[in-house]
Image: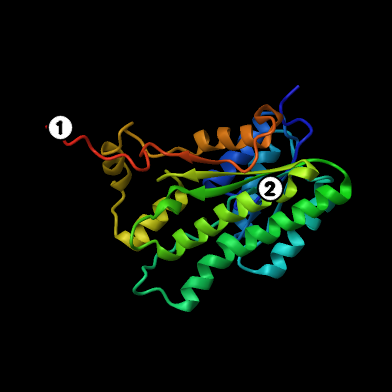
Amino acid sequence: MGVHEQTGALVTGGSQGLGLAIARELVAQGCRRLVVTSRNPDKGAAAVARLSALGVDAHTLPVEMGDIDQVREMVPQAVERIGPVTALVNCAANTDRGSILDTTPVQWDAIMDPNAKGPFFALQDFARHCIDSGHSGSCVNILSIVVYGGLPFLAPYVASKAALAGITKNAAAALAKHRIRVNGINVGWMDTPGEDATQRKWHGRDPGWLESAEANMPFGMLVKPEHVAKQTAFLLGSGSGVVTGSLMDFDQQVVGAYPDTNES
């Protein structure tokens, strides 16, 4: 019997990259009822085709996490399609750039709404569904290592993920009495299709940027989606026991550590 055999999962941003890796890992661990969201209906349909080929009841919803009306319809629509939803992954995010000196209010909202407001209300609706249905639940919010400060050109993104980190802690405490667990993962620099597009769009990187970047990493690679997916599935499942309100740093850079000045 798989760990997630009884799981009904909703994964936002589940059509590619980390979101799709999480969906696939849940399926590998026994999940047979799954809904993934995507801003792009074609990508959503392609993801569902891949998941359905694994023998699961998979569906997609076209959701823009910055559109609160779409977000508020998400959990009810997922329940209509797969029945009780017991696991939520807030993975979708806007990673556009902006610094403290040049970010506009429009850019701020374009990042904060899908990265913090949308996940907040998705979690609210998920929690209400669990409580009204009389079952426990587990949520994992995908955060970022930048919650500790980040690079100058990530100012609004940092703010959005820091907000979601606070939401994770607050919700975990509030929902524990309902046996709903909420945890977060501070993901480091990760190798995804979205990151490739971001590097090309915002930083003018050529097609070989990944190989060069990974050559400078301590373990010779960027964070890989399949590794984060396994941790996400663990936190969603019974194997993580009573753990709630936890924020895990999933990176090879140790926050607060500095190079040894005695080394040549």
- Residue found at x 74% / y 48%: 175
Q: Which of the image's four quarters has the C terminus?
A: top left
Q: Is residue 75 left or right of residue 108?
A: right
- Give residue 75's position: percent from left, percent from top: 76, 55
- Give residue 205's position: percent from left, percent from top: 29, 55
- Give residue 192's position: percent from left, percent from top: 45, 46
Q: Which of the image's four quarters has the N terminus?
A: top right
Establish if 141 lies above or below 2.
Answer: below
Residue 64 in sight in this render? no
In three-dimensional space, the C-alpha distance between marks 2 and 1, rounded to whole angstroms, equals 44 Å
User: Of the numbered discs in the image, which one, if any, rests on residue 154?
Assistant: none
User: Which amino acid type corresponds to the residue marked 1 in the rendered image?
Assistant: Asn
Q: In this view, does 110 lie to the left or right of 83?
A: left
Q: Which of 46 and 57 is in front in this view?
A: 57
Establish if 218 lies above or below 76.
Answer: above
Residue that label 2 marks: 173
Q: How crowded is mark 1: few (under 14 residues within 10 Å), some or many (20 or more)?
A: few
The residue sitting at the left extreme is 264
Q: Contact, CB < 8 Å: mark 2 with mark 1?
A: no
Q: Nearer the viewer, residue 7 or 124?
A: 124
Secondary structure of residue under mark 2: helix
> Residue 213 is drawn in which quadrant?
top left
User: Which amino acid type corresponds to the residue marked 2 in the rendered image?
Assistant: Ala
- Residue found at x 81% / y 57%: 76
User: Of the numbered discs in the image, which one, if any, rests on residue 262?
Assistant: 1
